[in-house]
Amino acid sequence: MTTTVAPRPTAAPATEAKVRRRWTQHGLLFVAPFLVIYVAFLVWPTLLGFRMSLSSVNIAGTNDHLVGFANYAEAFGDPRMWRSLWNTLVFTVLSTVPLVLLGLAFALLVHHLRFMQWLWRLSFFGPFLLPSAVVAILWLQMIYPPGYGLLNGTLGTDVLWLGDPSVAMWSMVLTTVWWTVGFNFLLYLAALQSIPQHLYEAAAIDGASSWSKLRSITLPLLRRTTALIVVLQLVASLKVFDQIYLMTSGGPQDATRPIIEYAYDVGFTGYRIGYASAISYILFVLIVIVSLVQLRLFRKRAEGLS
């Protein structure tokens, strides 16, 4: 007599909701360390700084009384704050344009060179690797000194590059362009190397000139990279501090003092941390607005050309 064994019941397949929930749990476990660090070192300090901007706290942490938006009202009526903000905007405009154009020009040059590309890459990107203190000492001691400086010796002039209010900001722009153009150069070079070569070959077959290839192929395909570089450069220029603080300390006659240095002076020299926090958040809002407007303009332009 043959006995039949009933098949063991199989486990019901996991539902789609259970699978999604399991993946969500695993994902949260993976990102939990990052979230903890993100909240501890970015979100919480941001909220704490905003709370401080609404108080009269000093550098010692005493006199911590809420004053509402009195610090912001004082900042908007502070002529030195407006002067430092104007200096920051001037520096941003003067530095962003050459940093973008020179980054593109250097990348095009290196991309089309067929000999010693490593040397050109190192030459253009090398200064970006230098610390701000090294850059400041180099330009202070070798390039800008009156009388024996390299710049005055080459031009045959005796200009006070950092002592004349009319040229001090231009001097800081020149130093910054030399120092940081390598980053934009590297981004453009990577974007150029990702453009398919067959597009240029097809254009060459059609008899397109080098200028036509640049205008019709290269620049349109670099539009997204240009948008990224412009936004990054605007944010970096609005946050300028290191080189100006080390080389001029905001002088002469506050001609180069950016808004971050003014907030630093108010907070750590005048001991008014609450007021310095309010100035910092004014700059923060300005950076957010500029970034959003710039991204929206590039997006509209891309949609119009597509």
Image (cartoon, rainbow, N blue to C red):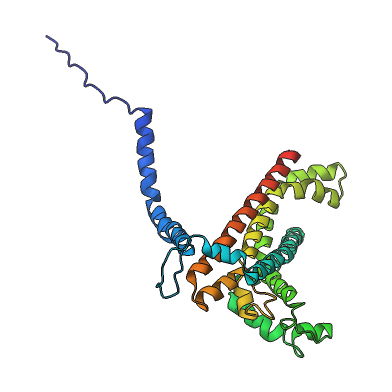
Compared to residue 43, the image places residue 18 above or below, namely above
Q: Is residue 186 visible?
A: no
Q: Residue at x 69, y 69 (%)?
A: 87
User: Percent position (x, y) of residue 115?
Assistant: 74, 65
Compared to residue 83, the image places residue 103 above or below, namely above
Name the quadrant of the N terminus: top left
Residue lying farthest to the top in this orientation: 1
Work out whether residue 256 or residue 298 is closer to the camera in this orientation and state it. Answer: 256
Q: Residue at x 87, y 49 (%)?
A: 209
Q: Relative to 209, is 54 on the left or the right?
A: left
Work out whether residue 33 or residue 251 is closer to the camera in this orientation and state it. Answer: 251
Residue lying farthest to the bottom in this orientation: 147
User: Percent position (x, y) of residue 139?
Assistant: 68, 81
Q: Is residue 236 visible?
A: yes
Q: Relative to 101, is 26 on the left or the right?
A: left
Q: Quadrant of residue 199?
A: top right
